Image: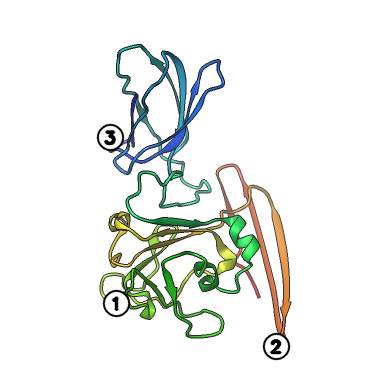
Amino acid sequence: MRLTAKDPSGGVVPVQGRLSAKGGTLVIPVSTAPSGTAVIDSLAPGPYVLTVSGAGFEAAELEVMVRAGEETAPEIALQLTQVGSSIVVKVLPGSLDGVPGATDTITREDLDVLRPLSVKEALRRVSGIHVVDEDAFGLNLNIGLRGLNPRRTQRTLLLEDGVPIHLAPYGDPSAHYHTPPELIESVEILKGSGQIAHGPQTVGGMINFVTQPPPNRTRGTVAVQGGNRDYRSLLGRVGTGRGPGGTRAPDSA
């Protein structure tokens, strides 16, 4: 089977999902390459159900019939997610098999365990990343990948939900801001040749900070922390959501 996923304009897009034997227990994970295609070999003849999704697109389902001795080439037409829906913008696909070079992901579970005071503390757990301290609270981010100068992260592209956060990514790619750790849902890191597709200044790599989506109902949380040297921290957040969208107030300290 050769799967192709396309957006409404007809362009191919990367997706991930599963292929299930209809009426059976066989489930095969599916992940397309950045080119938008995936090849699945050695399938037994019979009916299957293909379910896929991609960043910014609605989930799609397609029934596929596999016949002995024939190549099946289903095409799935994806629809864009409606404006106002809560979208978590990730750069990397669900499976990293199709991404060239080294990759890594810091998940929400990792952040809950680490409880990092700053983003640099979370990034130090990733191999190949050199973080240089400049201030105690990590307000100035100096990251070097692949042996490059870490000064102001000038050779590493920083993204927030897939958008560059450098003030001038083409002219002066100096990092004067990064997403606070309290707002981060996960962190995606590309350290190999796969980062070239994501914008300027990617010689050293690409780091994408995925922010937390609004809740699907009205809720709030309060976090209190304390430490030595009279360290005190009080963080609160509140958000609401229903149906196609939602809002979330920024943290306060």
| Amino acid marked by disc 3 | Gly
Tell me which label, 2 or 1, sits earlier in the chain: 1
Q: Mark 3 or mark 1: which comes first in sequence?
A: 3
Q: Residue at x 65, y 62 (%)?
A: 113
Residue 93 position in % (x across, y down): 42, 46
At x 54%, y 68%, the residue is 122
Residue farthest to the bottom, as pictured: 229
State the mark number for residue 4.
none
Q: In the rendered structure, find residue 10 and report the number of the disc placed on it.
A: 3
Q: Is residue 135 left or right of residue 144?
A: right
Provide the residue designation for mark 1.
Answer: 172
- Above or below, comparing residue 129 to residue 103 in the picture: below
Q: Nearer the viewer, residue 68 or 80?
A: 68
State the residue position of label 2. 229
- Quick one: SS at disc 2? loop
Please name the amino acid that badge 1 sits on.
Asp
Circle 2: is it few (<14), some (14-19), or many (20+) Cα within 10 Å?
few
Q: Is residue 121 left or right of residue 201?
A: right
Residue 111 percent location from the top left of the image: 60, 62
Q: Quadrant of residue 2?
A: top left
How far apart in space, not on screen, are marks 2 and 1 (Cα)? 37 Å
Residue 218 placement, left or right of 54: right
Three-letter residue code for mark 2: Arg
